[in-house]
Amino acid sequence: MKFKINIFALSLIIGLSSMTASASGLQTVNPRYVSSNYAKTKYPIVFNHGMFGFTRLGPSSFGIDYFYQILPDLARNGAKVYATQVSPLESTQLRGEQLLQQVDEVIALTGSPKVNLIGHSHGGPTIRYIEIVAPTKVASLTAVAGAIKGSKIADDILSNRGANTLLTVFSQYILAPVITLLEGNPSLPLSLNNSLQSVSEQGAAEFNAKFPSTAIPKDCGNGQKVTANGVYHYSWTGTAQFTNIFDVMDGVISTLAPLSYKNLDNDGMMNRCNTHYGQVIRDNYRQTHMDEINHVLGLRGLFFAPNPLAQYRQHANRLKLQGL
């Protein structure tokens, strides 16, 4: 029943909005109508996906978005939104350079001098790269379950030769090429090793030492909300490993972080404290790593679980009220 409801919702959204993509893979939404200005920020909102991520899989008439239903919802509430397409498996620096080109494209298309960046998982450090190399182009950074201090899952895989080899064969030579082919950009470079190095706790620590930021807390608290360059920083995450029996992705990833960390203080992929960045809006939502982006097909916990669409809508309003 839940599946049928979400398929209907997808059909409805397709009818109420159209999505377009540029040659670079930059995706935007052109709503048929705007119901409010609740999410109308001063600067465009630009999303960046995480590891194994994508903009859209499938044709524009019917397909699955990484940030499922989120961009159309924001667009109908007044926001100017874009989703970027970077390598699903690569280093933070390479992904960051790809993202920078698309940020420049958004600036050229809109005439806006800055953008609000939102990154999920590996998208967290990826959007942070833009502030490092082009801080004047950034109004705010928001990390959703961001790998700001990395994930021990990656460290464990890197140290296990057998697991590393098997995952490389499957992900780098099968899964990731299929993803880039389906999203229409098969030429994107792919490297599981570079990706794992970047999102590992060791790799993240090296990256943060090379590019320090007062928005990154030293403990499990809040970082600095507004840094010296005037950029605003936010974050949130969940701490659930399984929320819906019909969500196959929960079953795939729910044991990974608990096995690595030997606790449940995570969303199945990211340790709660490692995601803290700037103002921590909340760090214990009843959400898994995929629930945080409204996947799969909007499946989420039935009780006491927040609606991801409402979370992003409220955050856009938060940015709006800050003059961003």
Image: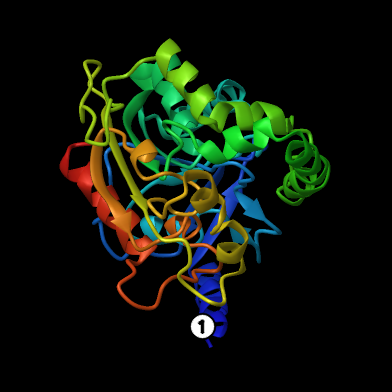
The residue that label 1 is drawn on is 2
Q: Amino acid at mark 1?
A: Lys
Could you tell whether 312 is left or right of 93 in the image?
Answer: left
**Residue for point 38% across, 22% down:** 137
Q: Nearer the viewer, residue 289 or 85?
A: 289
Q: Residue at x 65, y 37 (%)?
A: 157
Number of residues whose C-alpha sits closer than 10 Å to that of mark 1, classed few (under 14), some (14–19) or many (20 or more): few
What secondary structure is found at the residue carrying circle 1? helix
Q: Position of residue 222 (x, y in %)?
A: 22, 34
Up-down relation of residue 75 to residue 156 (above or below): below
**Can you give x and y, in whole percent of width and height, for residue 149 in the image?**
42, 31
Quarter containing the C terminus: top left
Residue 251 occupies which quadrant of the picture?
A: bottom right
Q: Is residue 102 in sight in this rendering? A: no
- 150 on left or right of 97: left
- The foreground one among 286 and 255 is 255
